[in-house]
């Protein structure tokens, strides 16, 4: 004969107290269908699309600054204003955008790949360190895991542990991307300074009583073909070791400063929410300015070596140069470069973070 279970009222106080206490506070690890955490595939897709679209806008905005920077590195001008005035007088407004085609393509692809590789490496290296040093040793603030209030209030320890991950992820991404971007950047530099090279050649060949013949500049595609025709496919990788060092180290600093700045500035957010537009813009500007300021001498070496290669017949050994780190020549164009990279990265990250949230 079935017996009925005793009601709550029938249970003695001792029996009730012997029941295990149920913890009603818990952490949500799987979100509901209305607020589902993005999958790994969705995060990678958002990263790629956001980086690509943001690059198109920021590259076009900052290209005139990049053109002036390259000209000042490769040739002698009295000042930034002198470079601007000479370019405007001899080439017109189009001179500031000469060679924009290559970076509009290459930078978009490079940024897309760079951010995708960086995000993947960051997750992989974080998981590897957590397996090695204990689960929860590093919490990736940019990943799907939400920081606890304690971690938000005191991000210092976690940030210090995560810095090597940011640095190595950036180094991996920058080194890999250099293989792709070097041909495009060498073509861009060739297009940017071809008129300056032509004028220097004519000045050496003609005396003062003759006027130099009119020179029709080549477009980006023609410059690309011309390099291959004269120097072969490997000619597109002229000066690669300088390019690799600049991109690998620069990308390491770039992401390390951005991630750190974003977290540190968020400490002072009174609402305790995600980083706001101002924090993102400032962090983006700082990461670009800091990485360029540190790596600028290396970028100058690259520009000078590549210019020497372009101004000599194929197969001719280039003059060996001894670069002095604290030579003012190594920092020619630094001011305009700082302005460019600050503007470009403030624009880029402001658009990128907004697009990433919307997609």
Image: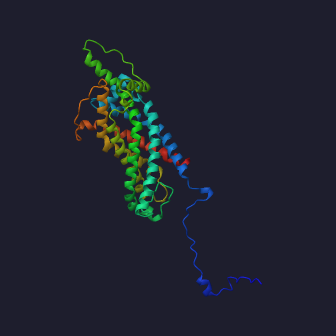
Task: Please indicate whether residue 241 sits to the left or right of residue 53 in the image.
Answer: left
Q: Residue at x 38, y 60 (%)?
A: 156
Q: How is the image coloured?
A: rainbow
Can you give x and y, in whole percent of width and height, for residue 132 in the image? 41, 61
Task: Please indicate whether residue 71 sits to the left or right of residue 120 in the image.
Answer: left
Q: Nearer the viewer, residue 211 or 204?
A: 204
Q: Nearer the viewer, residue 61 or 16?
A: 16
Task: Please indicate whether residue 28 sits to the left or right of residue 116 in the image.
Answer: right
Can you give x and y, in whole percent of width and height, for residue 252 in the image? 37, 48
Task: Please indicate whether residue 253 sits to the left or right of residue 34 in the image.
Answer: left
Residue 189 falls in which quadrant of the image? top left
Residue furthest to the top:
209
Q: Residue at x 34, y 34 (%)?
A: 69
* Residue 302 seen in this snapshot: yes
* Residue 286 seen in this snapshot: no
Q: Relative to 348, does residue 162 appear above or below in the rendering?
A: below
Residue 265 falls in which quadrant of the image? bottom left
């Amino acid at each position: 004969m079935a017996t009925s279970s005793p009601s709550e009222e029938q249970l003695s106080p001792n029996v009730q107290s012997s029941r295990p206490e149920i913890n009603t506070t818990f952490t949500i690890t799987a979100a509901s269908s209305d607020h589902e955490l993005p999958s790994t595939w969705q995060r990678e897709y958002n990263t790629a699309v956001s980086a690509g679209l943001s690059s198109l806008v920021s590259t076009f905005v900052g290209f005139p600054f990049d053109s002036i920077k390259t000209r000042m590195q490769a040739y002698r001008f009295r000042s930034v204003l002198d470079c601007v005035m000479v370019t405007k007088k001899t080439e017109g407004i189009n001179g500031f955008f000469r060679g924009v085609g290559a970076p509009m393509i290459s930078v978009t692809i490079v940024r897309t790949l760079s951010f995708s590789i960086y995000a993947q490496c960051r997750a992989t290296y974080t998981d590897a360190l957590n397996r090695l040093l204990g689960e929860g040793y590093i919490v990736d603030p940019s990943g799907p895991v939400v920081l606890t209030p304690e971690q938000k209030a005191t991000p210092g320890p976690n940030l210090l542990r995560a810095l090597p991950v940011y640095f190595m992820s950036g180094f991996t991404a920058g080194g890999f991307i250099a293989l792709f971007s070097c041909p495009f950047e060498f073509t861009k530099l060739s297009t940017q300074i071809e008129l300056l090279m032509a004028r220097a050649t004519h000045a050496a060949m003609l005396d003062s009583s003759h006027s130099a013949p009119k020179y029709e500049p080549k477009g980006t595609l023609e410059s690309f073909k011309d390099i291959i025709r004269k120097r072969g496919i490997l000619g597109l990788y002229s000066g690669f070791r300088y390019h690799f060092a600049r991109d690998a180290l620069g990308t390491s600093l770039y992401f390390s400063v951005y991630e750190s700045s974003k977290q540190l500035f968020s400490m002072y957010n009174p609402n305790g929410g995600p980083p706001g537009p101002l924090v993102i813009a400032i962090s983006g500007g700082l990461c670009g300015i800091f990485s360029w300021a540190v790596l600028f001498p290396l970028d100058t070496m690259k520009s000078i070596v590549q210019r020497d290669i372009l101004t000599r017949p194929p197969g001719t050994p280039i003059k060996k140069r001894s670069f002095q780190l604290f030579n003012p020549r190594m920092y020619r164009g630094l001011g305009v470069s700082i302005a460019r990279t600050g503007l470009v990265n403030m624009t880029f990250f402001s658009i990128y973070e907004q697009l990433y949230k919307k997609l």
